[in-house]
Image (cartoon, rainbow, N blue to C red):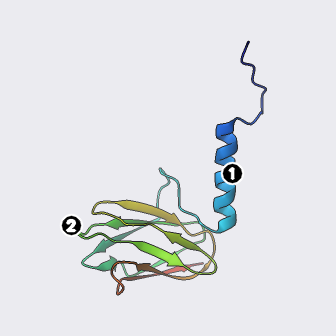
Amino acid sequence: MSDVRLRGAATPRRAGAALLLLSLATSGAALALAGTAASHRVTQKGRAFAPGSVALRTGEAIEIVNDDGELVHHAYLDSPQFSFDTGEQGPGSKTVVSFPQPGQFTILCGIHPKMKLLVSVK
C-alpha cells in the first residue's frame, strides 16, 4: 500500500500545533515560543526584579532571568486581561513572555511576596 498525501491536507502534527496555538490565543496566555527575541530583559536577583518597572508596546516581550545564585523564583501574573505562570525557575533559567494587549500589570514572585515588577503596555 502506498503512502499518498494530498497537498494542503492536515497532518496530525499540524492539526495539534494549530489546536495549541488556537487555545493559547483564546485563553489569553501568550508565552512566547523558544527563539523569539525579547524586547526587554528583567533579572531576578537579591529577591528583587531589576528593573522594577518596564514600559512596553503591545506585542513586545520581556525575558525574565533568574540571576540569583542559589534561589528559586516563581514569576506569575494573574489579571482578567492576561495571565501567565512560569512555575519554579531555578538559577540561570530564562522565560520569555509576550504581552498581547495594553494595560497595567504587576508580576509577582510566588516564593518571595515582596518581589514586584510593574509592566505598562501601551
Q: What residue type is labelled 2?
A: Gly
Q: Which of the image's four quarters has the C terminus?
A: bottom right
Of 89 and 117, nearer the camera is 89
112 or 43: nearer the eye? Answer: 112
The residue located at (38%, 72%) in the rendering is 74
Question: Residue 18 at what x, y percent from top left?
Answer: 68, 48
Residue where numbered disc 1 is placed: 19
Q: Which of marks 2 and 1 is nearer the N terminus?
A: 1
Quarter-of-image position of residue 70 = bottom left
Relative vertical location of residue 50 with respect to residue 38 in this rendering, above or below: below
Q: Quadrant of the N terminus?
A: top right
Q: x, y percentage for residue 15?
A: 70, 43
What's the amino acid at mark 1? Leu
Q: Position of residue 112 (x, y in %)?
A: 33, 81
Q: Nearer the viewer, residue 47 or 11?
A: 11
Q: Label 2 belongs to which residue?
A: 69
Rendered image: mark on residue 31: none
Which element carries disc 1, helix, strand or loop? helix
Q: In which quarter of the image is residue 49?
A: bottom left
Q: In this view, does 4 lie to the left or right of 114?
A: right
Which residue does the image show at 75% across and 24% down from the upper left? Answer: 5
